[in-house]
Image (spheres, grey):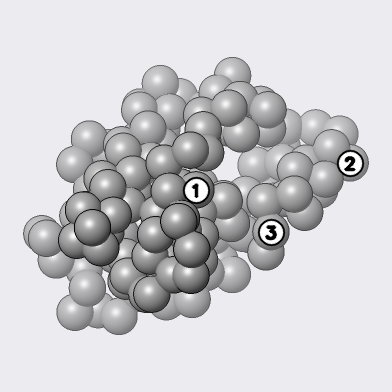
Amino acid sequence: MAIQQIMDDFDVLDSWDDRYRYVIELGRALPPLPEAEHNDKNKVQGCASQVWLTSETKPGNGAGGPLLELQGDSDAHIVKGLIAILFALYSGQPAKTILDTDANEVFNKLGLGEHLTPQRSNGFRSMVNRIRADAEQALARAA
């Protein structure tokens, strides 16, 4: 699902309870992460929940650098939904676009910052930092 669709859906949901359920549904729609990928190498540090992220680099065309295809999972339903939002924003995008896109701005536009616990917000930032680090590494390898 595209990030704009998620933002549009958020606009029509009246209550935070509806939005919360929607985020959980987004997480349920994520493709499963293979069990072998639930390992320490893929674990995101700084999250209160268990979170695993993987990125696969694919050739890109142009100055944006290689594309990153992302997969992930969490043991917490709401966090899995946050992963789905990040993937809508970043997965399949060129590394340079990932580095130029402010996920925290999207996070705040959706109102997530004011409705999630500080731990969840910190976990979101940890996931963003991990994806950005993967994008930086992909660009460095492509140079």
Q: Which kind of residue does numbered mark 3 sit on?
A: Ala
Q: Which kind of residue does numbered mark 1 sit on?
A: Thr
CA gap between label 2 and label 1 equals 28 Å
Q: List x then y, in percent, for residue 32.
A: 42, 76
CA gap between label 3 and label 2 equals 16 Å
- Residue density around tag 1, few if under 14, some if 14–19, many if 20 or more, within 10 Å: some
Q: Which kind of residue does numbered mark 2 sit on?
A: Val
- Residue density around tag 3, few if under 14, some if 14–19, many if 20 or more, within 10 Å: few
Front position among marks 2 and 1: 1
Chain-order first, disc 3 or disc 2: 3
Q: List x then y, in percent, for residue 143.
A: 23, 58
Residue 30 visible at all: yes
Determine which residue is flagged by label 2. Answer: 12
Determine which residue is flagged by label 1. Answer: 97
- Secondary structure at numbered mark 2: helix
Q: List x then y, in percent, for residue 60.
A: 44, 70
Q: Residue furthest left?
A: 40
